[in-house]
Image (cartoon, rainbow, N blue to C red):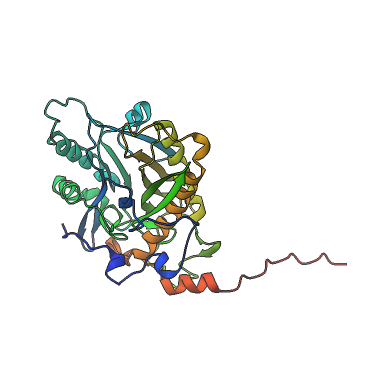
Amino acid sequence: MEPPVRPQSACGTRRRARDLGIVIGGAAPGPFNAITDVPGVRVGHTTVRRPPDVHSGVTAVVPDAVGPHTPLSAGIFTGNGYGKLIGTTQLTELGTLETPVLLTSTLSAFRVADALVGWMLERPGCDEVRSLNPVVGECNDGFLSDIRSRPVHEEHVRAALDGASGGPVAEGCVGAGTGTVALGFKAGIGTASRTLDLAGRCFTAGVLVQANFGGTLRVLGRTVTPRSAGRDTDGGAPAAETGSCMIVVATDAPLDARQLTRVARRAVFALARTGAAYSHGSGDYAVAFGTRPGGGAPVADADLGPLFEAVLDGVEEAVLNSLLAATTVTGPGGRTVPVLPADVLLAALTSPLSPPSRPAPPAA
């Protein structure tokens, strides 16, 4: 287990989208442009590396005071259900979240859920709890990590939960994103936030993604591939029909479970903006929760437009941040996935668009 990692955007090695002048949407981000801008939301990572075979970990999104006696309103949306999102049925049925949301590697999800249950039962006020619904999402990091070894254990889960904090969030190859790949490039964890006005009241929406999906990267209408970026792809790539994306959305707007399900739906829709393929083998999910239990009457449905737009923009930016913060990783068998170079991305965004090709006229 590695020690806690400082946010990569703060240490100068890689820059986030906004550091490069890439601005998505018109709404302003929160002070950290992270899910932790939503009051009462913390994030913790534990990174598990044993090069070259293991590149994995766990990420915890921890709302303050969440528990079986203090559930939060929540919703979930499944874009493509090839995944092992634990806790789905009860969350859908009751519209409430009882635990932090944890993200990890596919075959480690069940150990992580068990560890989360143990951690929750030790929380104050849980002495008599006899039912608990852990929520654990996953992506398959088996291309760059020995997934069969199930390297994420209870101590890693507890470290992520106990170490969760507010403020800047480490992105890229950390926690649950250590071994993930998206859109042909090394990806990982990404986050973003937006402040917005709903019917005259100011709120925040924050997102965090675990990016691991196929497709062709699109940024502001331009496509970028490893080949066009001049990156070596001889190490191969995950099969085009595999991959997943887990999205967690948090907001302090007073929404009910039905409305949060609508928010979660937009989060999955946003992946299309980045070039997601939504393939057969992809598990594309979003969990959205509110941080204001009993926080007044829900916002009217007719006033939700700015929130939907904020989530669409936030997810698009979070995916891009996950790519820009990542570092090249070599896994078992020498399989290597390159990073998205910031200079190449900027060059692609500023180069003239080629005119569309036209079919040759028929012969006279």
Q: Can residue 275 be seen at all in this image of the molecule?
A: no
Relative to residue 15, is residue 50 drawn left or right? left
Instruction: Determine whether 199 is above or below 326 in the image.
Output: above
Q: Quadrant of the C terminus?
A: bottom right
Residue 275 percent coordinates (x, y): 50, 55
> Which image quadrant for residue 358?
bottom right
Residue 32 percent coordinates (x, y): 33, 58
Q: Name the residue at 47% across, 62% down.
A: 23
Residue 316 percent coordinates (x, y): 45, 55
For the view shown, which residue lies furthest in the right direction?
364
Q: Name the residue at 23% across, 63% down.
A: 6
Q: Name the residue at 23% across, 42% down.
A: 64
> Which image quadrant for residue 293?
top left
Of 323 and 18, the residue lying toward us:
18
Q: Name the residue at 69% across, 67% down.
A: 357
Instruction: Determine whether 310 is above or below 5 in the image.
Output: above
